[in-house]
């Protein structure tokens, strides 16, 4: 009896916990996220790559860019992806006075809502630059701050292979940081999804509480 009990305890520590609503072949989920858009030269190719890979992602859009290209914002949502607030002009938010901080978030909320009819619930501070004041303002506007656990540094000029290597090292529950303005990032999509699938991980959504779940 004792040995059977020990076996059960061991399995609890070794066996992965599979979400109750997991799709077949998925033992866990990670979030693919893309910052700084919409970038006109890359959004549509990126959406096409994600569609071909049957993957969904969260796009943290910059308000000023969204105002210039609301059509791309709408296309992103129509393709089944989720939108987040990435500030109006991509500043270091912790350096701003309260009125400017409020405007950076609220103007972006207004533009994304006007473009899609949906109000974002997720927010990512540019550069990950945050503090208690930034988080408090985000909460006041109904936003949950979302950072990341895996940084592909795709913005730095690394090749596609390096982006894939970083992303596919993710574990269940991880949030992967990428950007929508680089061809290397677009080219990485099929290999990232394939590599994650080999680990029985699937692209998921970020909940209003900031956790990764089944889409």
Image: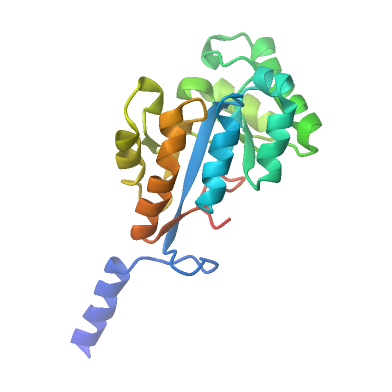
| Residue 174 drawn above or below residue 111 | below
Tell how many labels: 0
| Residue 191 drawn above or below residue 89 | below
Rendered residue at 43%/47% (across/down)? 190
Give the percent coordinates (x, y) of residue 70: 74, 27
Rendered residue at 62%/34% (across/down)? 84
Q: Which residue sits furthest left? A: 3
Residue 172 relative to residue 49: left or right: left
Rendered residue at 77%/36% (across/down)? 116
User: Can I make out residue 119 in this image?
Assistant: yes
| Residue 163 drawn above or below residue 55 | above
Give the percent coordinates (x, y) of residue 29: 46, 55
Residue 64 vs residue 68, the one in the foreground = 68
Task: Work out which quarter of the rendered image holds the N terminus and state it.
Answer: bottom left
| Coloring basis for residues | rainbow
Task: Work out which quarter of the rendered image holds the C terminus and state it.
Answer: bottom right
Q: Quadrant of residue 178?
A: top left
Give the percent coordinates (x, y) of residue 148: 44, 36
Give the percent coordinates (x, y) of residue 30: 45, 50
Rendered residue at 64%/15% (across/down)? 101
Q: Quadrant of residue 28?
A: bottom left
User: Can I make out residue 177 in this image?
Assistant: no
Residue 83 vs residue 39, the one in the foreground = 39
């Amino acid at each position: 009896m004792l040995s059977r009990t020990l076996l059960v305890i061991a399995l609890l520590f070794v066996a992965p916990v599979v979400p109750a609503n997991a799709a077949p072949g998925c033992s866990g989920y990670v979030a693919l996220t893309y910052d700084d858009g919409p970038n006109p030269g890359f959004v549509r190719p990126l959406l096409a790559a994600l569609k071909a890979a049957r993957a969904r992602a969260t796009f943290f859009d910059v308000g000023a860019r969204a105002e210039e290209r609301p059509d791309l914002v709408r296309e992103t949502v129509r393709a089944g992806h989720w939108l987040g607030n990435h500030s109006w002009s991509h500043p270091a938010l912790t350096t701003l006075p309260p009125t400017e901080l409020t405007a950076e978030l609220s103007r972006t909320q207004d533009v994304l809502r006007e473009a899609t009819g949906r109000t974002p619930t997720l927010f990512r501070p540019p550069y990950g630059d945050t503090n208690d004041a930034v988080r408090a303002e985000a909460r006041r506007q109904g936003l949950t701050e979302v950072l990341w656990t895996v940084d592909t540094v795709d913005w730095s000029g690394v090749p596609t292979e390096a982006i894939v290597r970083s992303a596919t090292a993710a574990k269940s529950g991880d949030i992967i940081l990428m950007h929508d303005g680089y061809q290397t990032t677009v080219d990485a999509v099929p290999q990232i999804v394939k590599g994650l699938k080999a680990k029985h991980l699937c692209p998921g959504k970020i909940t209003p509480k900031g956790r990764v779940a089944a889409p």
